[in-house]
Image (cartoon, rainbow, N blue to C red):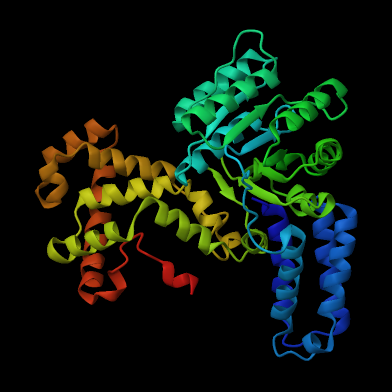
């Protein structure tokens, strides 16, 4: 995400950190390089001008020029101003209506990812203990209704009925009645994709807004389209007054122009960001965390939250107790491999680490995780608990059963032996191992 911009900025920062003392002209040169990087990243010109002026004014102050670490101070200024662009004040929570159910109207251009985003949003809210209902309001395109039904089944969220020949407003009214009867909240309305110059379809949105009184009107902006997404969002905002933006396909956006422009240009907060194709790849948008990612500082808090979502502190403690008592088994390893895969791709995990730019070219063997899990699955329970009994004949059987080679099995067993030895040492030490592989990392937030 935003790799091109991040790399350019980090080159500039490395150059500035390399100086024990920075002159005003050196700082101005660095700020000029940052300005160029932002323009090449397709950030709105007016946003760049305001950012450039604010950074230049603060970075050339006497306090920074006399600092013992001027390079670090300039980076802090850049981060602060970037957070201000992305949305000062932290995460913007989704609104709620005074009278349930709350209605979230999901709007945007055709092909921006509205239907998939609607399903992702439903999954996210369901995970927070709410009972969403998906409403297919794209009645002109039958395939859109069917797509939402399939995605609804995938995330375990019901989809409202669409009576034959019903208009979008009628479908939404019926869904509203149903939700009040059965206690569904919120309603996530997946509207038809439309161009802002299509007056008839924009009038339909105005009618839906008037009829449903939505708590949120969320514009799905395709991050990969840069300033086009910003301009289109502005036209929607002028007609129906958007309350929030969801950035879709941010994982495919190497530049970051839309993310760094849309909030400042529209005055509307980014509320959620899509970071992958899978249904779980929708995250609340935190301006400070996103700024840290762009500047190569990582996003450890998001990584911790992902880890805590797939493993409770009790599970980690139980693993630590088992290991202290009898050592790590291949069954434990299989369980941890499953948890790693739930966190997302290895690339997504690496991107959350500080200094991720330096790791970007590192080969990440996604297939290796799948291969290791297949090998362990092909073992008997006794072999998983006591890998020392796996002799030559068993290795051949395991390799055939997992679709791998004997060399692959040998490599896994060798790595496991080394890991087991290390884990035993750590387990004896106590504190170092109390959190397990995905232990309770709440201490990092203090």
- Where is 259 relative to 6, above or below? above
Q: Is residue 313 left or right of residue 26?
A: left
- Where is 209 relative to 437, above or below? above
Q: Residue furthest top?
A: 164
Between 44 and 26, the one nearer to me in the picture: 44
Between 104 and 366, the one nearer to me in the picture: 104
**Image quarter of residue 35:** bottom right
Q: Is residue 79 visible?
A: yes
- Where is 438 relative to 79, above or below? above
The x and y percentages for residue 33 are 83, 66
Q: Residue at x 74, y 32 (%)?
A: 209
The x and y percentages for residue 312 are 33, 56
The x and y percentages for residue 332 are 23, 52
Q: Residue at x 85, y 60 (%)?
A: 36
Q: Is residue 406 visible?
A: no
Q: How many marks?
A: 0
The x and y percentages for residue 419 are 26, 61
**Image quarter of residue 89:** bottom right
Q: Is residue 91 left or right of residue 183?
A: right
């Amino acid at each position: 995400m935003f790799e091109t911009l991040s790399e350019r900025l980090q080159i500039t920062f490395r150059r500035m950190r390399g100086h024990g003392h920075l002159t005003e002209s050196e700082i101005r040169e660095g700020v000029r390089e940052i300005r160029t990087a932002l323009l090449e990243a397709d950030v709105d010109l007016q946003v760049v001008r305001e950012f450039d002026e604010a950074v230049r004014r603060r970075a050339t102050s006497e306090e920074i020029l006399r600092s013992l670490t001027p390079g670090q101070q300039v980076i802090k200024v850049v981060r602060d101003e970037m957070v201000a662009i992305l949305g000062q004040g932290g995460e913007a929570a989704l609104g709620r209506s005074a009278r349930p159910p709350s209605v979230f109207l999901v709007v945007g251009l055709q092909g921006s990812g509205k239907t998939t985003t609607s399903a992702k949003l439903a999954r996210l809210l369901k995970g927070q203990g709410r009972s969403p209902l998906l409403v297919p309001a794209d009645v002109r395109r039958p395939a859109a209704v069917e797509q939402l039904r399939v995605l609804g089944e995938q995330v375990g969220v019901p989809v409202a009925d669409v009576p034959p020949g019903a208009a979008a407003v009628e479908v939404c009214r019926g869904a509203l009645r149903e939700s009040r009867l059965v206690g569904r909240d919120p309603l996530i309305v997946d509207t038809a994709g439309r161009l802002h110059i299509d007056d008839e379809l924009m009038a339909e949105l105005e009618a839906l807004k008037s009829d449903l009184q939505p708590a949120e009107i969320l514009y799905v902006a395709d991050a990969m389209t840069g300033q086009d997404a910003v301009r289109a969002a502005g036209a929607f905002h002028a007609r129906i007054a958007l309350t929030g933006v969801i950035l879709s396909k941010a994982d495919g956006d190497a530049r970051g122009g839309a993310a760094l422009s849309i909030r400042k240009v529209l005055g509307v907060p980014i509320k959620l960001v899509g970071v992958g194709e899978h249904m779980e790849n929708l995250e609340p948008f935190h301006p400070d965390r996103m700024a840290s990612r762009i500047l190569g500082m990582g996003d450890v808090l998001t990584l911790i939250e992902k880890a805590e979502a797939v493993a409770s502190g009790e599970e980690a403690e139980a693993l630590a107790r088992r290991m202290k008592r009898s050592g790590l088994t291949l069954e434990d390893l299989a369980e941890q491999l499953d948890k790693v895969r739930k966190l997302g791709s290895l690339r997504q995990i690496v991107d959350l680490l500080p200094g991720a730019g330096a790791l970007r070219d590192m080969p990440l063997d996604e297939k290796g995780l799948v291969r290791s899990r297949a090998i362990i699955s092909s073992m008997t329970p006794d072999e998983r608990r006591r890998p020392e009994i796996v002799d030559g004949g068993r290795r051949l059987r395991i390799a055939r059963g997992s679709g791998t080679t004997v060399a692959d099995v040998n490599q896994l067993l060798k790595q496991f032996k080394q890991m087991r030895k290390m884990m035993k040492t750590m387990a004896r030490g106590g504190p170092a191992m109390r959190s397990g592989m995905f232990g309770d990392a709440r201490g990092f937030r203090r």
